[in-house]
Image: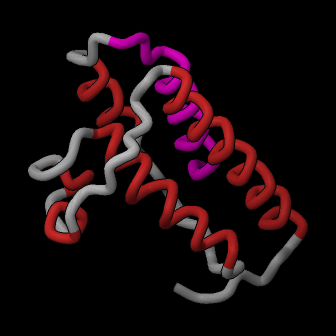
Amino acid sequence: MKIANNTSHEVAQMAAVQQLLIRLEGELKATGLWNTVVPSAEALASDTPFCIDTLRFSDWLQFVFLVKMQYILDNKLTLPQSMAISPMAEEAFNTEPKPTQDLLLLLIKFDSLFTD
């Protein structure tokens, strides 16, 4: 990853991402999907997209996605050029017994920030 140029567009995008990260964390907690137990290093090291072979999708959001996105923001690195998390969220949340519509809407907003 390289350090962002910090154009006005990138600064605005970083601010929007930060707000969505805060809202995503809050929604994971509100729905009871926030996990207080950190997955093992092996589970987090999965090479499978979304660590689907070792983590629940909500755990991937919490322990991989939120952490990596916050790292990018904190270090002023270049944000991803594109993102498509919501299709996986739709699939994963389809079998979730808890209400996840608001989580899905937040992830759709994330995706939309990274499309032209």
- Across and down, in percent, residue 35 comes to 38, 41
Picture mark count: 0
Find residue 90 and report its horizontal and vertical position in percent.
Answer: 33, 24
Residue 101 belongs to the span the image colors magenta: yes
Q: Residue furthest left?
A: 53
Q: Which residues are magenta?
A: 98-116
- Front residue of this view, candidates 61 and 80: 61
Of all residues shown, which one is farthest toward the right?
Answer: 8
Snapshot quadrant of residue 5: bottom right
The answer to whether 52 appears left or right of 5 in the picture is left
> x, y percentage for residue 112?
59, 40
User: Eyeballing the image, is 37 above or below 58?
Assistant: below
Magenta stretch, main secondary structure class? helix
Q: Is residue 81 above or below residue 102?
A: below
Q: Quadrant of residue 93?
A: top left
- What residue sits 41% from the left and 46% below the top? 61
Q: Is residue 100 above or below residue 87?
A: above
Residue 66 position within the rendered picture, expressed as x and y whole percent measured from the top left = 51, 55
Whether 40 is among the magenta residues is: no
Is residue 56 found left or right of 108 in the rendered image? Answer: left
Residue situated furthest bottom in the rendering = 2
Q: Residue at x 24, y 64 (%)?
A: 44
Q: Is residue 12 left or right of residue 13?
A: right
Q: Residue furthest front?
A: 36
Report the residue at 68% width, 44% height from top.
Answer: 22
Colour theme: secondary structure
Q: Residue at x 69, y 74 (%)?
A: 74
Question: In the shown orientation, is residue 4 left or right of residue 37?
Answer: right
